[in-house]
Amino acid sequence: MTDHRTRDVNAIDDRVFPRGARRGSECGVLKIGGVRATELVEQFGSPLYVVDEDATRATAREIRDALRGEAQRVGTDATVYYASKAFLSVQTAQWMAEEGLAIDVASGGELMVALAAGVDPAKIGFHGNNKSESEIARAVEAGVGTIIIDSEIEVARIAAATAAAGKRQRVRLRVNSGVHASTHDYLATAHEDQKFGMPLTDAPALVREIVSHEGLDFVGLHCHIGSQIFATEGFRESARRLLGVYVELAEIAGRQIPELNLGGGFGIAYTPEQAAEAPNVADIARQLADIVAEASTEAGIAIPHLAFEPGRAVVGQSGVTLYTVGTTKRVDLTGTGEAAPVDRGYTERLYISVDGGMSDNARPALYGSDYHVRIANRQSEAAPALVRVVGKHCESGDIVVYRDELPADVQPGDTLAVAVTGAYCWSLSSNYNFVPRPAVVAVRGGEGRVIVRGQTEADLLAQSIVA
Ligand code: LLP
């Protein structure tokens, strides 16, 4: 039996916690953005989403600089859109715009927030496989930079909106490259049998139709192969297939196709164990630029202007969720079966119930994702225990951290910090069991401030019509 026990169960690993997060010198309280986790919970409540503003901004800049710098190295340039579905609030959109990122929105609601944030409409890309006519009209009227066409029906819809508004609209066509990204099935988006985009083989006919409309300015193809991708091979194949049709599309359009959007999907580490395999942005950027340069040479065309749409990689690691422990219980793993189940050498698992769960983090239940947890209000010399952090909802799949290790003296009232919850946690949150959504607090320079108000039970009750 292999013993995989972790030795330092107090360590704050900077590969998963926000940069600069560390334990303070007295009592070892976790500080994020210079603010003690204990103060955050006292001031703003628990559970609480905490976003480190400087870390978010720095990551956004690094990703933008890496992708643009590498694109420039091969003789082109790149636009980096922040995929706002990962986490969107008015202030986050402002941070992204200030750091020089464009914004990708995927619904009228996301568009509304980006516009309310004062984002330059020309720097917004509008996605969606079922944009309503009114959403399209709003986007065209607002002057969004690009609308991504996802189906044939949309060509006429967008053309009608441009005619009504008396405007010309830049559009991209989303295609399926047929590449199977190696990720969870629900996160893979460019194989043929799913709802997004059009088959690449249909691109010539669709582009012919697009360019027949005065109001539509076709700028290039778009392909997002999926999310949480660790290897660049899928991007290579996808770029090669897309650029392979650019000569034909240029003939149809009567001019060069200026852009290529390769989507987002850059994977990140959720646990220290994943950190060794997770790609770093500089490497991805270098490889992507080389891939596009090679594929353009192969296709016999000039390298187009590139666009990317990372979401998770921009905000994932800058977010932490703080919870309060309510109950704990020990489960003997050896059971009565013939082969005694053991986990990392442990024969007992400590279940720790916290005051949130699948309503504030649906990802373990949806994708089987695992997370990393530490006690935030203190450190402890107690021996390590194998733990599973679970929520307060009425489902056994209500798991926040499937497997980790914590000091065995973890107890009711302790604050837990779960790392890498900056992406797709608040945005996928629900009110299951009438649990109100937690607030989002941004920390910076030793201070915390609410950027998204938390809900109260009264907010939830107010939605019910009382006869
Ligand atoms: N561009 C397009 C067209 C997308 O559909 C997505 C994600 C992105 C960019 C950004 O992907 P990212 O860089 O964040 O991986 N709820 C799932 C992820 C769904 C992603 C949907 N589209 C999760 O929690 O893992």
Image (tube, rainbow, N blue to C red):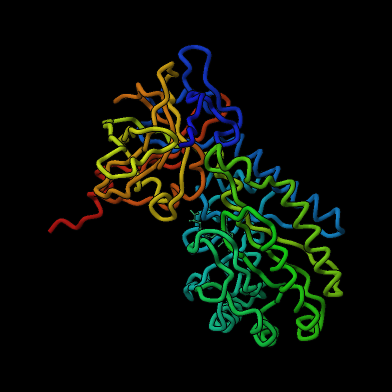
Residue 458 appears at what percent x and percent y?
A: 24, 44
Q: Is residue 181 above or below residue 327?
A: below
In the image, 248 versus 434, the foreground residue is 248
Say which quarter of the image contains residue 325: top left
* Residue 346: quarter of image: top left
Would residue 4 appear left or right of 285 to someone viewing this image?
A: left
- In the picture, measured across the screen, residue 321 lies left or right of residue 298, that is left
Q: Quadrant of the C terminus?
A: bottom left
**430 above or below 233?**
above
User: How many numbered marks does the figure carry?
Assistant: 0
- Residue 426, how many percent across, how many down? 43, 47
Residue placed furthest toward the left:
467
Along the line of sight, which residue is nearer the eye, 417 or 112?
A: 417
Residue 189 in percent (x, y) is at 55, 67
- Left or right of 430? Residue 419 is right
Seen at 69% across and 61% down, the residue is: 233
| Above or below, comparing residue 113 to residue 258 in the picture | above
What residue lies at 38% left-to-right and 38% top-to-bottom? 342
Of residues 31 and 242, the one nearer the viewer is 242
Image region (quadrant) for ligand 1 = bottom right
Q: Residue at coordinates 31% horizontally, 24% vertically from top-left?
A: 411
Q: Which residue appears at 44% of the width and 42% of the height?
A: 452
The quadrant of the image that shows the N terminus is: top left
Query: 247 or 239: nearer the eye?
Result: 239
Above or below, 57 relative to 149: above
Q: Residue furthest front?
A: 338
Find residue 379 and report its horizontal and vertical position in percent: 45, 19
Furthest-top residue in this view = 26
